[in-house]
Image (cartoon, rainbow, N blue to C red):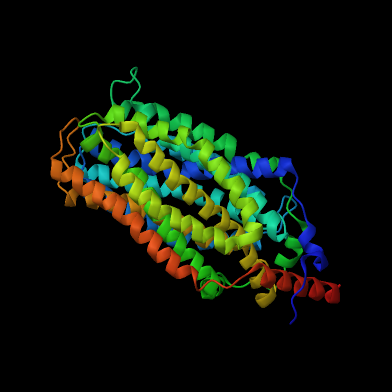
């Protein structure tokens, strides 16, 4: 096979309208609220407000991943196989957004006076309901983005809008705990009972936006109708792809670390920066998301342009290098003497995190082209399902890790308790140490990723020739 220049590839010139990019981006805000909203509230509400053992809460969260391990690939396969006048993805995005918003509201209607065992059972049940609805939404949502265009660089542009609105969703999730601390609420639990339904409504409004403004490509649906694999064979074929396996491992590293950081920073602040003051800590965490917006927007714009010269893999190398800087900055800038300096460390880490996910989703679209060449069908739904499940797994594992870390360092979950100096120091060491490990392992793994722009353009040219011959 010979390499094909971009100008000779008929698929490489596809463009997506600005309205479609914004509509796809709106869905990302709902996506991130669904991913990070539970993680932001579960530990503080169940441990600090209700006094439940944090290790027990972590176990409950981990159990729900067993259900997701089954549900996500099933949803991916269902979406890939669906043929309707509304498309393969849009019917599920619409219904899933509504159901996820309603079940998120339900999660926080928690009664008082129950035992740890009762709360443990309640948490498992409500999480299973929410994550089932969320899966119906998020798996097809991921998939529709991967197939919006076949242009190598336009894919990165589409995903830059997604990443911007990811940030909007992250900011919204970051303020959820602060919202429960408003003065007109008598307690954190009462605040959660009101903030939950409001957040669910926001989820619905943002989640249904892609349905009304994105039309699924007929060429993709035509390819998808051919040779669909049975579900487990499809899942195994997805996991056999070496390039995709590398992306999945990198996702586990980055997302687990980032979610852990955003969950544990509240406890670092309440034990070290603002001893015993949950309200001040939660307001600072919420404000950090607002302040770093300009940094992330600039990082996304720069990464989108720079990827055309250094490549998508090159941007990933930069992203993991930034996390090493983030680890060092956090050690020195999270300090009670100047509490708001930690915003700088957060902004550095957020820039690396967002640029990583920008490239992850753009590169997954490239992998779907290689998969079509090998297997003769489009399986964005299954690829989206694997990524979605891994992301939810990472979020849950990270929150469970926070519970384990709190127990390990002797954190006193009594609301208002003043922690020991050793507890505060241990939490800071864990925070920075995780990002050092992430950066080293991530840079090492990237050496084995080989799907370059030249290779993708060659694959697309062969697909075009194959379709022309079949036509």
Q: Is residue 48 left or right of residue 421?
A: right
Q: Tell me if residue 321 can be seen.
A: yes
Which is more toward the observer, 250 or 118? 250
Locate residue 205: give its quadrant.
top right
Estimate the x, y position of residue 121 in percent, counting from the top left. Answer: 28, 47
When the figure is inspected, residue 111 is found, relative to residue 224, above or below; the finding is: above
- Residue shown at 45%/69% (left/top)? 445
Where is the C terminus found, in terms of image quarters? bottom right
When the figure is inspected, residue 417 is found, relative to residue 73, above or below; the finding is: above
Estimate the x, y position of residue 166 in percent, counting from the top left. Answer: 53, 43
Q: Is residue 377 left or right of residue 263?
A: right
- Residue shown at 20%/49% (left/top)? 426
Q: In this view, does 250 lie to the left or right of 76?
A: left
When the figure is inspected, residue 153 is found, relative to residue 271, above or below; the finding is: below
Count all numbered tags in the image, as a single digit: 0
- Residue shown at 70%/40% (left/top)? 212
Where is the N terminus found, in terms of image quarters? bottom right
- Residue shown at 47%/29% (left/top)? 198
């Amino acid at each position: 096979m010979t390499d094909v220049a971009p100008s000779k590839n008929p698929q490489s010139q596809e463009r997506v309208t600005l309205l479609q990019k914004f509509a796809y981006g709106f869905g990302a805000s709902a996506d991130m609220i669904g991913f990070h909203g539970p993680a932001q509230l579960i530990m503080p509400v169940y441990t600090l407000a209700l006094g439940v053992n944090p290790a027990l809460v972590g176990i409950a969260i981990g159990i729900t991943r067993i259900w997701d391990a089954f549900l996500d690939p099933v949803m991916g396969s269902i979406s890939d196989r669906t043929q309707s006048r509304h498309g393969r993805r849009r019917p599920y995005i619409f219904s899933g957004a509504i159901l996820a918003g309603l079940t998120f509201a339900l999660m926080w209607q928690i009664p008082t006076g129950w035992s740890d065992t009762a709360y443990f059972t309640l948490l498992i049940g409500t999480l299973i309901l929410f994550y089932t609805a969320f899966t119906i939404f998020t798996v097809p949502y991921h998939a529709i983005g991967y197939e919006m265009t076949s242009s190598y660089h336009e894919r990165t542009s589409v995903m830059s809008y997604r990443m911007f609105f990811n940030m909007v969703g992250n900011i919204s999730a970051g303020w959820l705990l602060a919202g429960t601390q408003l003065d007109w609420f008598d307690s954190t639990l009462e605040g959660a009972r009101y903030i939950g339904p409001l957040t669910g409504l926001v989820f619905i409004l943002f989640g249904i936006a892609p349905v009304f403004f994105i039309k699924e490509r007929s060429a993709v649906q035509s390819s998808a109708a051919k040779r669909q694999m049975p579900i487990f064979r499809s899942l195994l074929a997805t996991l056999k792809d070496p390039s995709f396996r590398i992306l999945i491992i990198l996702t586990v590293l980055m997302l687990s670390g980032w979610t852990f950081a955003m969950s544990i920073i509240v406890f670092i602040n309440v034990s070290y920066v603002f001893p015993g003051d949950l309200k001040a800590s939660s307001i600072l965490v919420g404000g950090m998301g607002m302040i770093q917006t300009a940094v992330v927007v600039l990082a996304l714009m720069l990464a989108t342009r720079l990827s055309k010269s250094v490549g998508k893999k090159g941007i990933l190398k930069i992203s993991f290098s930034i996390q090493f800087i983030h680890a060092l900055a956090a050690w020195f800038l999270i300090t009670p003497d100047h509490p708001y300096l930690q915003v700088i460390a957060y902004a550095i880490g957020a820039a690396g995190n967002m640029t990583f996910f920008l490239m992850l989703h753009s590169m997954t679209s490239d992998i779907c082209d290689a998969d079509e060449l090998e297997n003769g069908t489009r399986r964005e739904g299954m690829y989206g399902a694997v990524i979605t499940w891994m992301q939810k797994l990472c979020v849950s594992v990270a929150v469970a890790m926070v519970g384990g870390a709190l127990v390990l360092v002797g954190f006193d979950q009594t609301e208002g308790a003043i922690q020991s100096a050793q507890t505060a120091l241990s939490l800071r060491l864990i925070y920075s140490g995780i990002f050092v490990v992430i950066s080293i392992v991530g840079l090492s793994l990237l050496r084995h990723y080989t799907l370059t722009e030249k290779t993708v353009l060659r694959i697309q040219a062969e697909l075009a020739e194959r379709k022309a011959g079949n036509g």
